[in-house]
Image (tube, rainbow, N blue to C red):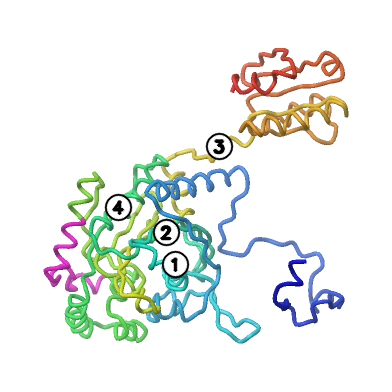
């Protein structure tokens, strides 16, 4: 009934919507015995490691929720030009690392390499800036970059991000940074450090660009780096190659040419961070890899991760919203790496988990008991207890082994004689103690025991 009243439906397939065209079968040369694997460079999480992944993601996002940030769900792919204009054509992200493809309509789309441009696009498209400022949003999910895979550097990686748009208050910068730090602390991480810098305002950047361009012109740079320096000389400062970094030892620093307003803003951010007791280190050469950053720029690093030490970072972006068709509103945000944060927890020996998969394991001995335990399982779950049940009519011994594998604290054993007496045996799997409990009181008793 709903479909009849709506617009006509268009199929994404090249075949007519009601086509019964058969699957053409394997392509020529297709190996029917092929074993499939996850794509190279993808961090894949399966139990029990997936519990740690969820715990990290939850801890990083919880800090944003407690600070009043609202969730936004973003597309996995966007118009390619969104990233060309927003992130910067000269960046490695756009020029080398994006997964870009044409859809069936000939439109160029790219898997999202970062989150800020998509959030700003959503703010502009849905007029979120008309409902009061600042706009505070958080997001989470996978992002994609065609990088050389290595430990902590993946082609599909996961982030939790925060964006706050519509205020230039340095206190907002400090709040955003503190939210990120709180997320790491919530996990128990101690070995991370915060690096802080200012990339200056528009006036500062114009002046600094001239000084830096003159300095770079006297260096023996390769043709590709020379081209990058012409597009955006700050990109050269972000080059991680040792031979390039050696040539940049005497490069002029942005902080030496900051305008008065940019310097005051940076000093105010530092003051607020000290008030929040967030430790930071001055990092005058910190640039980060995206073109839209201005003024406050920061990065969290962990020394236990080797070369890929960054576990998150971000900064302020004064002109991005207007570049993408919106108002002249400033913003600040970050992206925290879930994968790398999980590696940092492992480096510190922290065991993180999203909660016990199973608290109570139900063991039916016979079909009538199985049917009754189905209802008991639903009752316990309604009371917030995680419950699993033995399937396939296993023996008592086999069912108890299954209970041990789940890590359950309690096992409930129910057989025909128990049903007749309207009781069940509840066993503490840690101590081995067992007691008989009336079925009518089972839910209440189990909650007390847990």
x%, y% of residue 284? Answer: 21, 64
Q: Is residue 79 magenta?
A: no
User: What residue did someone put label 3 on?
Assistant: 355
User: What residue did someone put label 2 on?
Assistant: 137
Is residue 203 positioned above or below 145 on the image?
Answer: below
User: What residue did someone put label 4 on?
Assistant: 175
Q: Quadrant of residue 450?
A: top right
User: What residue did someone put label 1 on?
Assistant: 119
Which mark sits nearer the N-terminus, 1 or 3?
1
User: Where does the magenta region start and end?
Assistant: 246-269
Of residues 402 and 132, the one drawn nearer to the viewer in this rendering:
132
Cα–Cα span, label 4 and label 3: 29 Å
Cα–Cα span, label 4 and label 2: 13 Å
Q: Element type at marker 4?
A: helix
Left or right for 348, reference 439: left
Q: Please tell me how crowded label 4 is: few (under 14), some (14-19), or many (20+) other residues with Cα within 10 Å.
A: some
* Mark 3 or 2: the one toward you: 2
Left or right for 369, reference 49: right
């Amino acid at each position: 009934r709903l479909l009849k009243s709506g617009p006509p439906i268009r199929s994404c397939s090249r075949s007519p919507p009601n086509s019964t065209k058969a699957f053409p079968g394997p392509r020529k040369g297709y190996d029917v015995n092929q074993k499939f694997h996850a794509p190279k460079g993808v961090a894949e999480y399966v139990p029990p490691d997936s519990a740690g992944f969820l715990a990290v993601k939850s801890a990083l996002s919880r800090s944003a929720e407690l600070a009043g940030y609202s969730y936004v769900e973003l597309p996995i792919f966007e118009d390619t030009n969104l990233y060309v204009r927003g992130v910067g054509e000269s960046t490695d992200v756009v020029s080398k690392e994006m997964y870009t493809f044409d859809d069936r309509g000939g439109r160029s789309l790219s898997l999202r390499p970062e989150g800020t441009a998509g959030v700003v696009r959503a703010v502009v498209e849905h007029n979120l800036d008309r409902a009061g400022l600042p706009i505070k949003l958080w997001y989470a999910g996978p992002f994609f970059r065609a990088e050389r895979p290595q430990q902590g550097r993946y082609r599909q990686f996961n982030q939790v991000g925060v964006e706050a748009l519509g205020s230039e208050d340095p206190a907002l910068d400090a709040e955003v940074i503190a939210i990120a730090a709180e997320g790491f602390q919530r996990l128990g991480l101690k070995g991370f450090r915060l690096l802080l810098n200012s990339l200056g305002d528009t006036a500062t950047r114009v002046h600094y660009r001239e000084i830096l361009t003159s300095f770079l012109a006297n260096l023996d740079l390769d043709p590709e780096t020379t081209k990058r320096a012409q597009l955006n000389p700050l990109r050269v400062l972000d080059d991680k190659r040792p031979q390039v970094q050696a040539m940049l030892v005497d490069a002029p620093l942005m902080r030496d040419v900051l305008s008065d307003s940019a310097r005051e803003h940076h000093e105010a951010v530092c003051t607020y961070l000290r008030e929040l007791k967030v430790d930071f280190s001055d990092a005058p050469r910190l640039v980060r890899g995206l073109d839209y950053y201005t003024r406050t720029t920061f990065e969290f690093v962990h020394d236990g991760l080797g070369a890929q030490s960054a576990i998150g970072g971000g900064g302020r972006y004064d002109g991005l919203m207007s570049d993408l068709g919106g108002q002249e509103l400033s913003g600040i945000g970050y992206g925290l790496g879930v994968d790398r944060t999980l590696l940092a927890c492992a480096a510190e020996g922290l065991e993180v988990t999203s909660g016990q998969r199973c608290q109570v394991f139900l063991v039916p001995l016979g079909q009538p008991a199985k049917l009754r335990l189905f209802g008991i399982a639903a009752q316990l779950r309604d009371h917030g207890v995680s419950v699993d049940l033995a399937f396939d009519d296993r023996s008592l011994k086999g069912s108890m082994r299954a209970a041990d594998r789940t890590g359950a604290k309690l096992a409930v054993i129910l057989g025909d004689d128990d049903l007749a007496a309207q009781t069940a045996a509840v066993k503490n799997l840690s101590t081995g103690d067992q007691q008989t409990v009336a079925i009518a009181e089972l839910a209440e008793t189990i909650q007390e025991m847990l």
